[in-house]
Image (tube, rainbow, N blue to C red):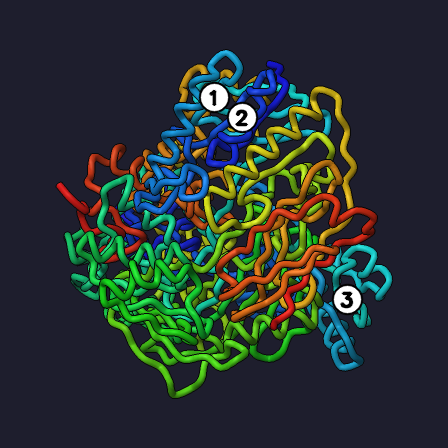
Amino acid sequence: MKTDVLVIGAGAAGMAAAIAAAKNGLKVIVAERDEITGGILNQCIHNGFGLHYFREELTGPEYAERFRERLSEYTDAIQVLTDCHVLKLNRDKKALLVSPKGVFELETKVVIYAAGARERPFGSLMIPGDRPSGIFTAGVAQRLMNIDNRKIGNRALIVGSGDIGMIMARRLTLEGTEVVGVVERLPYPGGLLRNVIQCLKDFNIPLYLSSTVVEVRGKERLEEVVVAKVDEQFRPIPGTEKIFKVDTLVLSVGLIPQVEMLDSLVSLDARTRGIACSSTGQSSCEWIFAAGNCTAIFDLVDYVTREGERAGEYASRYVIGERFTRGVPIVPGENVMLTFPNFYSDVDDLTLYVRCRKPMERAVLKVGSFERVFEDLIPSEMIVVKVPRQKLTGLGRIEVTLQEV
Amino acid sequence: MRIAVIGAGVVGSLIARELCRYDVEVLLIEKNLDVGWGVTKANSAILHAGYDDPVGSVRSRFCSVGNSMYTELSRELDFEIKRTGSYVLAFNDEEIAVLHRLLKQGEKNNVPGLELHDRDTILSREPRVNPEVKMGLWAPTAGITEPWMVAIAAVENALENGLKLFLNEEVVDFERQNGRIVGIVTNKAKHRVDVVINAAGLFADEIAKRVGAEFVPLHPRKGEYILLDKKLGSTVRSIIFPAPTEKSKGILVLPTIDGGLLLGPTAEDLPSDRKHDLSTTSQGLEAVKGFVLKLVPGIDFSMAVKTFAGLRPESPQKDFFIRASDSVKNFVNVMAMRSPGLTAAPAIARYVVEEILQQQLGLKFSPKRDFNPLRKGIKKYAELSVEEWQRAVKESPAAGRMVCFCNEVTEVEIIEAIRRGARTLDGVKFRTRAMFGRCQGGFCMSRILKILERELGLDASKIVLKSPSSWIIDGKVRE
C-alpha cells in the first residue's frame, strides 16, 4: 500500500493532523491501535474540553465526536484503520502495520507521529512495601470506570494533585467510592485552580500537600497506605507518618511521551522527554513530523489539536515540495522549566508553550526582543503566547526567561 | 504406583516431569493458584556457572551439571535461555585474591571455560563497567532464563504425559500406616499415595516436620530487586557480579531475557516466621541503587518499571538437603534450595528420580513408551516473518490484534495462555509477558481482564491478580 501521509495515532493530535493534510489535497492513512478514534478523550467523560477551540464546554467523548465527524467528511482522502498497530517504521519510509484484517507494509511520503503519552507506572516510583492488587494508574482507573463500567474499590487514596488526579477524586466519589484524600509532593496543588475547587473543595476531599506515599501494605488486596510529610528536597520526614486504611490507590504522577517507536530515527528533547520538534512540527528526521503529547505534555486538548493542525499543515507542504530549516534552538532560561517547540523555523510567527519552574505572582516573559507580563503563574499552567516573527529575526538561539517583578 | 510431589516450583515441576517418563501415576500439589509462584518467581533468573559453591558441597555437585543440562532442556521444553556469560569483578588486591580462589574452586567443580581477564579486556566487552576495575573472572557458561517459565514449561509437558496437577490446594496433614505415608490430606481432598517428594520450597521444613521426617530448619533470605526499562537493557551484555562475600554473591547488574535490566538482590536474613514477607523496603532499594553504581556507574534509575522482592530458603548448613528420609521410608526431602537452586534443578530432578527413588529406595519403574519430551511454547507472533504472520491472521484475526503494545503480545497469545491454565492476571502476565513492559499494563490490563472474563465465562469481579483475595474490581459502577 502507498499513501502520501501516514498519521500514527487518532487522538486529538492525529485527527487534527489528518484533516489538515486532507484539506491540502493529500491522501492520508490514519493508523489507530484502539478500536475507535479519539484516543484518551474517550475515557475522559468529564467536561471542560474545547473552551479555547470551540468556545464551549464539551466532555472528552463529545470533543472526540466532533473530530470524528470532521474526519468522516474526508472519506475520499482519509482512510482510518482502527485496531491497527504500527509495529515498525523504517528509514526507507516503509511502515509495518498489524491488525485483525492483516499484516501489511505501507509506503509513505511523510509520517505524522501522534502517539500521545503513557502514564508513569507505580513501579517507577520505587515505593517500598507489598505488591497487592488495588493499585491503579488514573488512566486505568478511568478506563475501567468510564468505559468498562467497573467499580475499582471502596475506599481510595489518590496520589498526585494534577488535573487527572483531582478529576479522578471527584469521579470516584460520584461513583460511590469513598476518597479519603489526595496526596501531593509539592507545597502547592499540581493542577488547575478550578479543579481544586470543583473536584476537591466541593466534595470535602482533603488535599495533603508536601506529602508522599512511603509504603503500601497488603498481602493480597491493598489494605494500608502510609503517607509522610516531605522536606524541601522531597525526602520523607520521619515521625510524620499517617496511615490510611484503603483498598484502592490511584496514581496520577505524570505522563511520559511515547517515543519508543521512533527512538532510533529522531532526536528527543531532554526536558520534555518527547520528540524534539521545530515550530513546523518537524522532527530531526525531515520526513517525520510529530504533534501532541508525544512531543511534550500539554495542559489542554485544545492546544494538542492546534499542534496537530500545524504538523498536518507543514507535513503537507513538505510533501508538496517545500523544505524547511530546522531553525534555531529555543532554550529554557531563568525560572523556566520547559519550552515547546524546541526549535524555531523562520516560516511563521512562533506559538510558544512555556512552563514556569515555581509559582510567581508577576513575571515578565522575554523571548528575543518580545516581552509580556503574566500574573499568577504556576508550573501546572502552561503559558501560551504567539511571538511575532519580526521579534525573532537574526537570533542564533532563543532563550526564554521569566523574570519575577 | 502413585508418587506425589509437593510444590510446583522449578524443582518440584522438573521432578514431576522426570517422573512422567515412567509408568507411574504422578501428582503435583501446589498451594498457589499457579505454578512457579513461590521461591521460583522472584530471583536473579541466573544459570550459574558453578564456581561459587564450595568443593564437595551438594551445591557444587549439581550446579555445573544442571547448568549444562539447560541447553537440551530449553530445546525440549521451548523456553528461552541466553548464555550471556558472567564476570566477577575485582577492584582491589583483596578482591583479586578472591577471583583466584574462585577460579581454583571452579576448576575443581568442573566449570568449563573460566578465564581471568584484565581491565582492558573487560572494558572492551563491557564498556559501561566502572573503569576502576582491576580484574574479572569470566565464566562463559553462565546465562539467564525466566525461572517461572521453566516451571510452566515442565508442568505443561508433564501434563501432556499424564501428570495430575492440583493447584490452590494446600497440604495440611498426612495419613500414615506402619511408618509409611499412605495419604496426603489437603484443604480440599485426600490423595492416596505410595511415595511423597517434598519440594515445598520455603515451607519444606514444615512439611517434613508434619510428616515426622528429618529436616533442616529454613528461614527466608530476602532479596530486593529493581527492574529497569528495556531502553537500558543493553547497558551490560553479561551478568556483572561483585566479588562475593561470605554471605552472598552480592548485588548484581544483569540483562533479562526480555531485554530489560535487572538490579539486585539484597540479602537480608529474616526469622523463620516471615516466610510470606515479600515487601520491599526503602533501605533495601537504596542499597541496591548505591551498590550497583559501583559496578556500573551512570545507571538511570528514573527508568525503573518495577521493584519487587523474592525469598530464598536458607538453612544453617547453607547447602541443599536432598535425601530419602530414614524414619519415613517413602518420603524424600528436596529442600533448602538456596542459590544456585534454579541452575541445579534439572540435575536434582534426575538425581531424585534415578538415584534416590530407583537405586536407593529400590522402586521399580518401567519407562513410559509413549513419553513425549517435547513441549511447544506459546507462539510469539511478533517474531514471525510478515508472510507467516499474514497467514496466521487470515486463519485467526485475533493473531493481528495487538493487546500489549510494549511487549507486542497479540490476543491469540493471551487466549492460548488461558487455555494452558492462566486463571489470573499474573497467570497471563508470566506466560505471555503482556503487562510486563514499560507501561506495566497501563494500556492492556483492562483489555486482558475482558479477555479473561470472556474465555473463562466469569464476571470480572471474580478474577484476581495472583491470590484468592487479590480482587481487582468490585462489581459494576452502575447496573
Given the image, on which type of amino acid does mark 3 rest? Gly
- Residue linked to disc 3: B136
Q: Provide the chain ID for the residue under circle 3.
A: B
> Mark 2–mark 1 contact, CB under 8 Å?
yes
- Residue linked to disc 1: A80
Of the residues tagged 2 and 3, which is closer to the observer? 2
| Mark 3, other Cα within 10 Å: few <14 / some 14–19 / many ≥20 | many
- Which quadrant does the C terminus of chain B fall into? top left
Of A41 and B299, nearer the camera is: A41
Q: Across the whole image, how many numbered discs are drawn on residues? A: 3
Q: Position of residue B164 (x, y in %)?
A: 27, 42
- Residue linked to disc 2: A18
Q: Secondary structure at mark 2?
A: helix
Nearest to N terminus: mark 2 or mark 1: 2
Given the image, on which type of amino acid does mark 2 rest? Ala
Q: Position of residue A368 (x, y in %)?
A: 74, 55
Q: Secondary structure at mark 1?
A: strand
